[in-house]
Image (cartoon, rainbow, N blue to C red):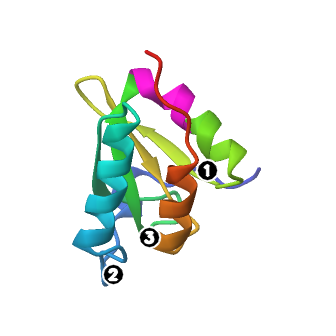
């Protein structure tokens, strides 16, 4: 670990985005709403300085969502955001069908 982490300014990078279209984002959001999770599809810069699809979720839901993603073998980054929110960044740029099929297998939020 001889290199330091990128600063927020170094992460700024332009690319053609978004990779998930509106219909796919809406379907993911709809499925998660039915399961009791509040989320929005957003775009965030990952630690590799590239734009990735992400979910903006409540911080209280992050541990449960991470566990669900872990069960589906999906690798993500988590980034804190303001006002009780966090983003779950899909840095491996999974195909939307992979995410949709995984989300359908999530457990309900018992919070």
Tell me the CA gap for discs 1 and 2.
Answer: 24 Å
For marks 1 and 3, give the one nearer the viewer: 3
Q: Position of residue 83 (x, y in %)?
A: 22, 24
Q: Earlier in the sequence, mark 1 or mark 3?
A: 1
Few, some or many C-alpha atoms within 10 Å of disc 3 (few <14, some 14-19, many ≥20)? some
Residue 45 vs residue 40, the one in the foreground: 40
Q: Position of residue 63 (x, y in %)?
A: 55, 27
Q: Looking at the image, which residue is at 39% across and 25% down?
A: 59
Residue 101 vs 103, above or below: the answer is: below
Judge left or right: residue 104 versus residue 39: right
Q: Looking at the image, which residue is at 43% across and 15% down?
A: 111
Q: Is residue 111 magenta?
A: no
Q: Is residue 62 magenta?
A: yes
Residue 100 vs 64, above or below: the answer is: below
Main secondary structure along the magenta-highlighted residues: helix
- Residue named by callout 1: 4
- Residue named by callout 2: 15
Tell me the CA gap for discs 1 and 3.
Answer: 17 Å
Q: Which mark is residue 94?
A: none
Query: In which image quadrant can residue 64 be found?
Result: top right
Tell me the CA gap for discs 3 and 2.
Answer: 7 Å
Q: Which mark is residue 50?
A: 3
Q: Mark 2 and mark 3 in contact (Cβ < 8 Å)?
A: yes
Q: Earlier in the sequence, mark 3 or mark 2?
A: 2
| Residue range highlighted in magenta | 60-65
Q: Position of residue 70 (x, y in %)?
A: 68, 44
Q: Is residue 90 visible?
A: yes
Residue 6 vs residue 78, the one in the foreground: 78
Residue 35 vs 53, above or below: the answer is: above
For marks 1 and 2, give the one nearer the viewer: 2
State the residue lying farthest toward the bottom: 16
Q: Mark 3 and mark 1 in contact (Cβ < 8 Å)?
A: no
């Amino acid at each position: 670990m001889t290199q330091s982490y990128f600063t927020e300014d170094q992460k700024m990078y332009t690319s053609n985005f978004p990779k998930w279209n509106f219909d796919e984002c809406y379907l993911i959001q709809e499925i998660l709403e039915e399961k009791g999770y509040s989320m929005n599809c957003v775009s965030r810069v990952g630690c590799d300085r590239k734009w990735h699809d992400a979910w903006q979720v409540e911080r209280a839901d992050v541990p449960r969502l991470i566990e669900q993603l872990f069960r589906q073998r999906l690798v993500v980054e988590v980034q804190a955001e303001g006002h009780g929110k966090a983003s779950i960044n899909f840095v491996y740029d999974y195909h939307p069908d992979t995410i949709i099929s995984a989300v359908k297998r999530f457990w309900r939020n018992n919070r």
